[in-house]
């Protein structure tokens, strides 16, 4: 992070172009490339945490600046800490809401397992109504119907890879928690030193890419803002509306399923999975009308959100057609995981912006010059009414 005694970006400037031979230039570029690669290799395990830090910082920066302008005396420690605490609350509270029902179900499952171990498991009544029901009941009694047989079955499952799967799940959980901790730590310093970091990024982008770099950077920031609004906020809204519908329909654990819907709704087409699961749960309780109602309400809510609200929020902020944003989201998730929800649209925004400037469909420093288009029939075609 930026040190307190570091001068602002652009403070120290050279006078004129320093003399450097071609060999020295190549060696300098090679040294810089090696340093960058070495840095990426060193931080490879923490790159996801840094990516999430950048996303959270971009999303929270406007609100942080407004808050810091109102209480400037607390912008170095208290306000960054409060914003980090808010992020913790937003992520920890849903985890607690999910963990409580699961812990209760786990306790009930443990008691059921102990009873099954002591007395065996009686065959369900519907087996007798199936073809060859007698043979199925005999097989049931042979495998898990007698006391102690359930432990043999579970022991075989654990030997078959269950223990390995549980160990891997535990390691991944610890790894995610550690990365989340570093994300919060990075967020604190990014918010605290945000002005310095922004100045440095702007100076670096101008030096590397000219004025085009600054323009692309601003569009990427707008893309992240639009993606946060279009995915996260709209997903939360879908979760609230459908959660209320679950509660009215008397869905078991309506709050839990509403939270699950909100999380899945942040991914395109993810809400449909949650709605289908809830409909199956209701159908299992024997309420066909309620299941159909949930499906109909879910289709209406997701249709409005995905076809009207999200395109305006995401495409309007990034000035990119929603189709490319959608492809960026899906491709980003496939390539980068969950963080790709935000990296994908940002990459597509940068590519579309560069393309538009390159072909001259929007003003920019890499527009074609007139001599390049001489004799090109496309250069003499009527201009699009939206051309600026």
Image (tube, helix red, strand yellow):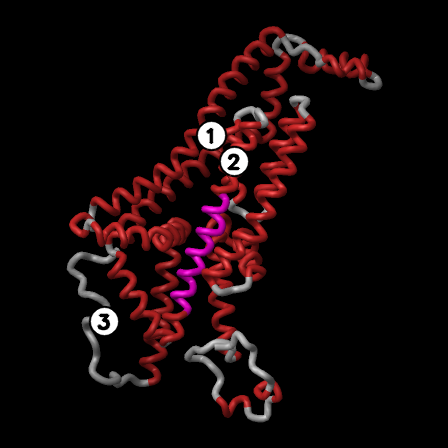
Quarter of the figure with residue 43: bottom left
Going from the N terminus, do you reach mark 2 or mark 1 first? 1
Rendered location of residue 117, percent (x, y): 59, 11
Q: Along the polypeptide, which appears first: circle 3 or circle 2?
A: 3
| Element assignment for label 2 | helix
Seen in the picture, residue 31 relative to 69 is either above or below; the reply is: below
N-terminal label among 1 and 3: 3
Furthest residue to the top?
119
Residue 220 part of the magenta-drawn span: yes
**Which residues make up the magenta segment?**
216-235
Q: Is residue 46 visible?
A: no
Res 331 → quadrant? bottom right
Q: Residue at x 38, y 65 (%)?
A: 218
Marker disc for residue 98: 1
In the image, is residue 194 above or below residue 108?
below
Q: Are marks 3 and 2 in contact (CB under 8 Å)?
A: no
Q: Which residue is mark 3?
A: 10
The residue tagged 2 is: 260
């Amino acid at each position: 992070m930026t040190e307190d005694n570091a001068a602002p970006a652009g403070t120290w400037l050279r006078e004129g172009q320093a003399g450097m031979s071609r060999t020295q230039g190549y060696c300098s570029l090679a040294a810089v490339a090696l340093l960058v690669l070495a840095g990426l290799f060193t931080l490879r395990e923490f790159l996801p945490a840094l990516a999430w830090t950048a996303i959270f910082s971009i999303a929270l920066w406007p609100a942080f600046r407004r808050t810091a302008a109102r209480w400037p005396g607390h912008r170095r420690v208290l306000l960054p800490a409060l914003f980090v605490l808010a992020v913790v609350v937003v992520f920890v509270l849903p985890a607690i809401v999910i963990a409580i029902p699961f812990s209760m179900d786990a306790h009930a499952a443990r008691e059921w397992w102990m009873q099954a171990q002591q007395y065996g498991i009686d065959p369900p009544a519907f087996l007798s109504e199936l073809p060859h029901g007698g043979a199925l009941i005999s097989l049931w009694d042979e495998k898990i119907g007698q006391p102690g047989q359930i432990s043999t079955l579970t022991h075989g499952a654990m030997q078959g890879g269950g223990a390995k799967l549980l160990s891997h799940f535990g390691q991944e959980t610890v790894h995610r928690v550690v990365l989340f901790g570093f994300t919060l730590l990075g967020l604190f310093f990014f918010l605290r030193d945000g002005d310095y970091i922004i100045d440095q990024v702007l100076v670096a982008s101008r030096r590397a890419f000219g004025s085009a770099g600054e323009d692309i950077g601003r569009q990427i920031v707008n893309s992240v803002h639009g993606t946060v609004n279009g995915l996260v906020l709209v997903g939360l809204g879908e979760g609230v509306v459908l959660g209320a519908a679950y509660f009215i329909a008397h869905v078991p654990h309506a709050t839990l399923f509403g939270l699950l819907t909100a999380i899945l709704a942040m991914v395109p087409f993810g809400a449909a999975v949650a709605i289908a699961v809830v409909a199956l749960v209701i159908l299992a309780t024997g309420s066909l009308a309620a299941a159909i109602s949930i499906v109909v309400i879910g289709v209406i809510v997701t249709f409005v959100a995905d076809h009207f609200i999200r395109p305006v929020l995401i495409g309007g902020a990034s000035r990119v057609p929603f189709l490319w944003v959608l492809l960026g989201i899906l491709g980003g998730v496939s390539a980068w995981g969950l963080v790709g929800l935000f990296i994908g649209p940002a990459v597509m925004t940068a590519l579309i912006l560069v393309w538009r400037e390159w072909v001259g469909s929007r003003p920019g420093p890499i527009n074609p010059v007139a001599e390049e288009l001489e004799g090109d029939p496309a250069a003499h075609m009527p201009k699009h009414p939206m051309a600026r």
